[in-house]
Amino acid sequence: MFTEEEKQRIVASIQDAERNTSGEVKVHVERHCTSEPIQRAAEVFVQLEMNRTKLQNGVLFYIALEDHKFAILGDSGIDAVVPANFWENIKEIMRGFFRQGKIADGLVAGIEQAGQQLKSHFPYQSNDVNELSDDISFGE
């Protein structure tokens, strides 16, 4: 699905984003999405236990590569503080990369945007704990 270099860049962008915030970012990749992407993202969000973060400030980037579908889902803590069209704006940025076949670049750009919002609303605290793995998760 991704080259090793692309995986490393995506994980590095997650780590960079989380270095400045108490928020959590995950990327989940599947080949196919048999439902609406946001619905599937909500299912994955719970499966990955992202709904259990202390400040409810997790952000999931869900992508179904072969179906060309994706969604961004923020937990209630981050959703309450970002502008109304924030996730859609990130999706448009990502979509521009995706149309060029640059999936990893699109994910990195989206993660950077989410990380900036997380930093401004949930700044890093000295006692911060990385609640979720930074690795990309893969499904069917």
Image (cartoon, rainbow, N blue to C red):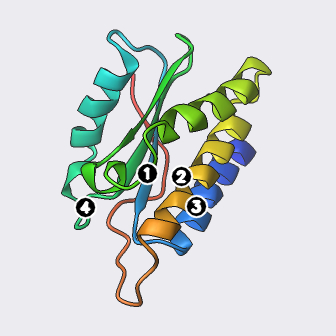
* Res 4 quadrant in image: top right
Task: Looking at the image, tell me whether mark 3 or mark 1 is earlier in sequence order.
Answer: 1
Q: Do the residues labelled 2 and 3 touch (CB within 8 Å)?
A: yes
The amino acid at mark 3 is Gln
- Closer to the chain start, of discs 4 and 1, is 4
- Judged by depth in the image, the label closer to the viewer, 4 or 3, is 3
Name the residue beneath numbered marker 2: 114
- The residue shown at (49%, 36%) is 85
Mark 1 neighbour density, 10 Å: few (under 14) some (14–19) many (20 or more):
some
The x and y percentages for residue 133 are 40, 59
In the image, is 6 to the left or to the right of 29?
right
* Residue at x-position 52% and y-position 31%: 88
Whether tag 1 and tag 2 are in contact, CB under 8 A, the answer is no
Viewer-nearest of discs 4 and 2: 2
For label 2, the crowd category at 10 Å Cα-Cα, with few meaning under 14, some 14 to 19 and many 20 or more, is many
Report the residue marked by disc 3. 116
Residue hosting label 1: 82
- The quarter of the picture where the N terminus appears is top right
Amino acid type shown at disc 1: Val
Q: Is mark 3 on a helix, strand or loop?
A: helix
Report the amino acid beneath label 4.
Thr
Which residue has dot 4 on it?
53
Q: Distance between the residues labelled 3 and 1?
A: 11 Å
Q: Distance between the residues labelled 1 and 2?
A: 10 Å
Looking at marks 1 and 2 on the same chain, the residue that comes earlier in the sequence is marked by: 1
Q: Helix, strand or loop at disc 4?
A: loop
Reply above or below: 30 against 135: above
Whether residue 2 is visible to the viewer of this picture, yes or no, is no
Cα distance in 3D space between marks 4 and 3 = 19 Å
Q: Where is residue 61 in the image (x, y as percent from the top left)?
A: 47, 39
Task: State how far apart marks 2 and 3 are (Cα).
Answer: 5 Å
Q: Quadrant of residue 42?
A: top left
